[in-house]
Amino acid sequence: MKIPAKLANYINGKLQTPSNKKYFDNPNPSTGKSLCKIPASNEKDVSLAVKAAEKAFPAWSKTSSQERFKILNNIAELILKNLEDLALAESMDSGKPLWLSRSVDIPRAHQNFQFFATAQMQFASESHHMPGEAINYTLRQPIGVVGCISPWNLPLYLFTWKIAPALATGNCVVAKPSEITPCTAYLLGKICIQAGLPAGVLNIIHGMGADAGQAIVVHPKVKAISFTGGTVTGARIASLAAPKFKKLSLELGGKNPNIIFADCDFKKMLKTTVASSFGNNGQICLCGSRIYIEASIYEKFKRAFVKKVKQMKVGDPLAKDSNLGAISSMGHLEKILGHIEIAKEEGAKILYGGKQIKLKGKYKNGAYLEPTVLEGLDPSCRTNQEEIFGPVVTLTPFKNEKQAIALANSTAYGLSATVWTNDLNRAHRLGEELDAGIVWVNCWLKRDLRTPFGGVKNSGVGREGGWEALRFFTEPKNVCISY
Ligand code: TXE
């Protein structure tokens, strides 16, 4: 499975050229060279996709759960079979190290299909008995045609995290991957053809957010939207979809706190904190970008953390020893560098990093950045309040638990939080007090796909994962039978 010179949309079971025949360039961020051309699809293509999905819906929604399992599990198996090609495509498209797409992104895409293929077979609905009078039962029926829009940081991983539960519950889908990283979504279309997914059940449209993405959001026949991406885009989508009473699931940005108490397991904390700060170049909505350290261990932590960060190798994503690859696009690198300039103006002391890296030879035009550690910033400054979404963290000391909670809760975001402590009571107290959809204690990114996933405040609306996703993609109907 190779990336062709021109990607195609996947509509009605076939790979198709965009109706306007227009394309735009997709650069490889690790070299700056063109990787392929992307269809510049518009509302015409979306309209064709919605028509195909509507046509496929009556049969797909009535397909038995065993049959749906079989087809979705076929897709899962084919993802695994093509792991190497998919991992390579993901790395060239996003700049992330090949070892990372091979060990995390693509295996997780496989698991997403496998998990929801089986989960829908266990899904049940409630009944409510009114003794001597009536019985109520809840039907959970597929919604119809739904839209799934995903970002560039974990391309196939997040794309399939939405599509798999939508298909598993009997919906037909019109999906759009990010225009920054469309390659594995294109390959998924080919896999679906091989897996025997009926025509029109899944349609994948490529193009810009404002054209193809927005056309999905406003299409009157698209009844629900599941979106992951930036908070500003999320607000725009909500403003367009809400007046049309569409169901909405929005997984948006984060500015996650990592709270380190002096009584923690220092070695384990240090190793995990390097990963939670710089994993995927800090381009995971769950990365902990505000590190709060109890004052008594602040200097010890700072020394040990900076020493580890200095050892990280930034380089060719295909090299085995690169800890970090390229930033996902030159535009995003410039945005992060802009944030570093703001931090300097706000009085940040740069403990390490802060500069673009110019590699040699083939990689000289790639988007590389030093992992960056800052200190000395006020908790209320822009650097500590705005999502940077790059390899940039701030260190801030705290005096006691109360202050740590106040600092952690001091942003407009509330996606995840990490706590390091060996005090069990304190761990429970923080679990209660932190404004976040997900709290990790003495770990980070430990994921059980059955758990609710999502954020509070500006980090989004609704939850993904497990039953939450199956509930989102179904409409509950109460049937009351009197006797
Ligand atoms: O994402 P966008 P961008 C954050 C991060 C980043 C910022 C912007 O801070 O710097 O968001 O990133 C589609 N109608 N996150 O600009 O624009 C778009 O084509 C419908 C956090 O790349 O939100 C893409 O498929 N769709 C995040 C998807 O939305 C539209 C991950 C996401 O793009 C649209 C990524 C529109 N009007 C960025 N405009 C996380 N939480 O993981 C754009 N899109």
Image (tube, grey):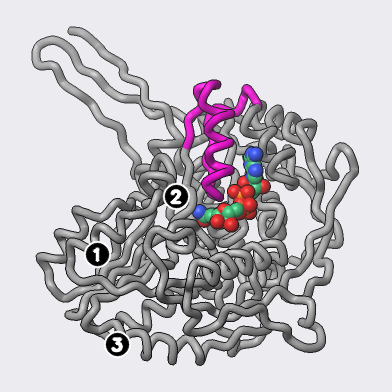
Residue type at mark 3: give it.
Lys
Q: Report the residue at 85% width, 45% height from top.
A: 17
Do labels 2 and 3 touch, CB within 8 Å?
A: no
Name the element at disc 1: helix
Quadrant that contains the N terminus = bottom right
Do labels 1 and 3 touch, CB within 8 Å?
A: no
Where is residue 403 shown, x and y percent of the image?
Answer: 22, 63
**Disc 2 versus disc 1: nearer the observer:** 1
Q: Tag 3: Cα neighbours inside 10 Å, few (<14), some, or many (≥20)?
A: few
Q: Quadrant of residue 227?
A: top right
**Disc 2 versus disc 3: nearer the observer:** 3
- In this rendering, the answer to whether 233 lies above or below 1 is above
Q: Quadrant of residue 378?
A: bottom left
Asked if residue 139 can be seen in this view, the reply is yes
**Disc 1 versus disc 3: nearer the observer:** 1
Name the element at disc 3: helix
Q: Which mark is residue 267?
A: 3
Query: Is the CB atom of the residue marked by disc 2 within 8 angstroms of ligand 1's nearest atom?
Result: no
The magenta region covers 219-248
Q: Tell me the residue that label 1 is attached to.
A: 404
